[in-house]
Amino acid sequence: MPRTILLTEDDKDVAKLTTTALQNAGYTVIWAPDGIKAVEILQNNRIDLIILDVMMPVFSGYWFCDVFKRNPDTKDIPVIFLSALSSEEDIKRGLELGASAYLTKPFKVKRLIDTVASFFE
C-alpha cells in the first residue's frame, strides 16, 4: 500500500508541482491549502508523513507543527518543512518544533523525493 503524505501548502502552483512529483514517485498525496483543512485531514486519514509550508493563511506551519507534535496520536508522524523562509533562525525554529527536515524554496524535486524516501527506508 502506498504511503500517504499530507501536503499543506497554500500556493496552488507549488502544491500541484509537489503533488505530481510525489505521485510519480509512488506516494498518495492529500492536499490541504491551509492549517484548518490540514487538521481535518489529519483527524480523518492515516497519514505517514507531512510536508508543511510555514507561511499559510489562518495558522502558520509552525503553529500547526507545534499543535500536532503535542498530540500523542500524531506526534510520531515525520514532518518536512518546505518553505521560502530560509534563515538559520527559521530552520532552527522548525526543527525545534519537531520537524525531521527543513527544505527551502525554490527546491529541487529530486532532493524533496530523496528526503521523503529517507523516512520510509
Image: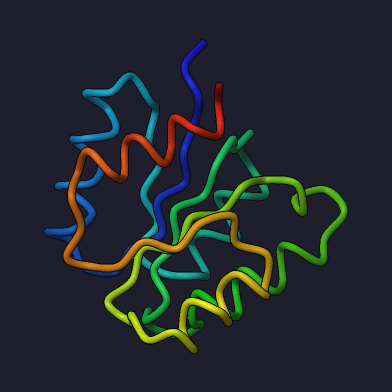
Quarter assignment of residue 11: bottom left
Would residue 82 be found to the left or right of residue 80 on screen? left
Residue 117 vs residue 24, the one in the foreground: 117
Residue at figure coordinates x 82%, y 66% from the top left: 70
Eyeballing the image, is 57 above or below 110? below
Q: Position of residue 110 (x, y in %)?
A: 22, 38
Place of residue 24 in the rendered image (x, y in percent of width and height, measured from the top left) = 21, 23
Residue at point 18%, 35% (across, down) = 20
- Asked if 50 appears above or below 90 in the picture, the reply is above
Query: Which residue is depicted at the point 47% across and 46% down?
Result: 6
Left or right relative to 121: residue 29: left
Q: Residue 32: which quarter of the image?
A: bottom left
Residue at x-position 59% and y-position 38%: 47
Figure quadrant of the C terminus: top right
Depth order, front residue of 1/87 = 87
Residue 28: image x %, image y %?
39, 28
Residue 26 spot, x, y in % from top left = 33, 19
Labels in figure, total: 0
Q: Front-most of 12 and 94? A: 94
